[in-house]
Image: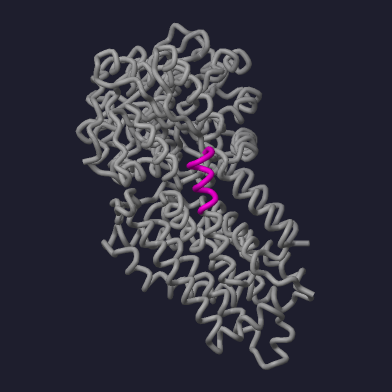
Amino acid sequence: MFILITGLLLGGTYALIALGLNLQYGVARIMNLANGEMLVAGGFAAFWLYTAGQVNPVAALIVIAPVAFVANWLIYRFMLQPLVKRAKSRGALEVDSILATFGMSFAFVGIMTWAFGGGYFNYAFLAQPLEMFGSSYAQNRVVAFVLAVVIGGALWLWLTYSRVGLNLRAVAVNPASASLVGVDVRRASALAFALGGAVTATGGALVSMFFTLDASVGVLFTMKALIIIIMGGVGDVRGTIVAAVILGIAETAVARLVDPGLTLAAAYLLFLLVLLFKPAGLFGKARG
Amino acid sequence: MYRRTFTQLAAAAVALAAGAGMSLAQDTIRMGAAAPQTGPLAGGATVTHWPAVRLWVHQTNEAGGLQVGDRRMTIELVEYDDQTNPQQAIQAAQRLATQDQVDFMVAPYSTGMNLAAAPIFAQLGYPMITGTAVTDQQPALAQQFPNMFFVLGRTSVMAEDTAHVLVGMRDRGEIGNRVALVNVADAFGIEMAGISRGVLEENGFEIVYESSYPLGTQDLAPVIDGAKAATPDAFIAWSYPGDTFALTDQAIVQNFAPHVFFTAVATAFPGYAARFGDQIEGVMGMGGVNADDAAFQAFAEAHMEFAGQAPDYWASAATYATLEILGQAIEATGSIDRATVLAYLQDRSHEYETILGPVNFNENNDNERYWTVGQWQDGVFRGIAARGRDGAVAAELFDGWN
């Protein structure tokens, strides 16, 4: 039971880390290597609001998410759209966006180091135990998990049942055909990118409740997010959540039953198996 | 045509001005410093390295500079970010030597970066007094790089002393002999865990839980759960900052409270106390200082005032001391000639007055007097074990997360 719950909590954390990138990569086709930095920025914002203003990190999301949405929309509009316009093919856009966002990640690290210094950031919020089934779990992780479920569920419902969500899914499947049936691909992409950034920053704010962050730590999150969205299937919210939970439970089980030193090996083994047997990811559709 | 002439003239003027600046600049000593401002070790360097270095420069200049022969010379500090990248550290040292033509260099931050930069320091002939390099390779290194000095101590001794603290407590009947031993899976963690395991087993301790976890892991609930299930008397973790915080956090959440709770790097950071408050009373960690010593207290106060943050209770003072040693060697020789200063440092009969207390170097360029284990007592991280230093206080039992 301990393994299952700890694994679920960890899976929730992973889902928070990866959901935003999935939107950005799946719909807007931007392989955003600065994703982890956006996450850390969200965490720093939560840290700052908490320590300077005693604002509860969950309440702080009301500010952090919209700000991140606008910031990411601007980034897309002014830095990435020129790449989209000139890209001749999907492959070209991916290469260009990888290079551009790779550069951006360094710029973000520089800005955050300048603004916050290079030190470690953490704070104690809901770091008390919660008793469930005879074991204790950190309350902040439980809160983050619940919010991950809420965010993931809301995203999935919205993508599945709303008109705008339908547009986004159409773009994710095939941008060229989507524009033929009257979807404004450019707007849909910008929306997806901005929304993805907002989700990532939200994840960062939640993760900062229990992770020690510093300005340079973002790349670790980017790597984790990449594995999860590729495992889950690009452009599919369900896939990301399922992959995140599987990864969380597998890592926890290996750490507790075998050896904590093998968690990374277990994660990559799973990743390899998925790639071998479902190359498009758990929920991905093979592209023609 | 005219434009070209003008450009040439301007260039000549700039060169002249630069030349004039150079001759005037004889009243300043140029010091170069390359250490992490970004990258994985930036967090530690921001706590330990940079404020101590800048504080020493600031204080020295406030006091009118160093007395070099019959002149007072102030310090000019040139800083580079080595991005926690050994290649960058080497390039930065080269650039400092050739481009910025600094007179002396501050040794980099962390064992790894110091080892990476050692060959280039030696090749360029700069004294390298390290304040954050802990290794067991001192004799070999000192042989290979006679310009390299070590202030912070040896890894094996720290691992041994940590084990000996447990042995002492067991022999006094304060704890039993069940130990949980975990470590971060990199060179540091593996080496430290190996040494402490050896000492503990020799002394009849039983290792009831042993595991390692990958570098960068912060999800350590399974590790704490496993350790707790083994019901140890003592928990020892050779950990790095991120995992030090995460292990402590999880131990509090799962109420895992053995009689000894030890985490390694960052336990002595002021941020550790800021994060956990008085819950950490009795937690042990790597390093330590004589917190009651007037020199350390004056340093801590100045550090707080200058950098807006407290020093850590371990390597901050050692980093500051490396510059005190360099400054004293420069003043004693009355010269900013590197070879002269290096020869002075290599003369083992010299002793330096530092905030750590007196320091001298043995035949391996090694300082033999340093702190090895500390413990949070009444909100202060006090040294409980040391080699050759006075002021160690008695180890206390950890009586739970209150």
Identify whether B132 is placed above or below B170: below
In the picture shown, does residue A16 fall above or below B316?
Answer: below
The foreground one among A254 and B267 is A254
Q: Residue furthest bottom?
A: A182
Q: Residue at x 48, y 63 (%)?
A: A16
Q: Quadrant of residue A80?
A: bottom right
Q: Magenta stretch: give its range.
A: A249-259
Q: Residue at x 45, y 27 (%)?
A: B131
As drawn, is B334 to the left or to the right of A105? left
**Colour scheme in the image?**
one colour
- Residue B5 colored magenta? no
Which residue is nearer to you in this view: A11 or A29?
Answer: A11
Residue at point 28%, 28% (across, down): B259
Image-quadrant location for residue B356: top left
Left or right of B17? Residue B286 is: left
Image quadrant containing the C terminus of chain A: bottom right
x and y percentages locating residue B241 in the rendered image: 43, 40
Task: Work out whether residue A132 can be spotted.
Answer: yes
Query: Residue at position x 56%, y 13% from top?
Result: B139
Q: Can the viewer see residue B320 in this picture? A: no
Q: Residue B385: x percent and y percent?
A: 32, 19
What main secondary structure does the magenta stretch of the protein show? helix
Q: Relative to residue B60, is residue A90 depicted above or below?
A: below
Is B193 situated above or below A199?
Answer: above
Q: How many marks?
A: 0
**Residue B204, image x, y percentages:** 39, 14
Residue A255 lies in magenta, yes or no? yes
Left or right of B249? Residue B89 is: right
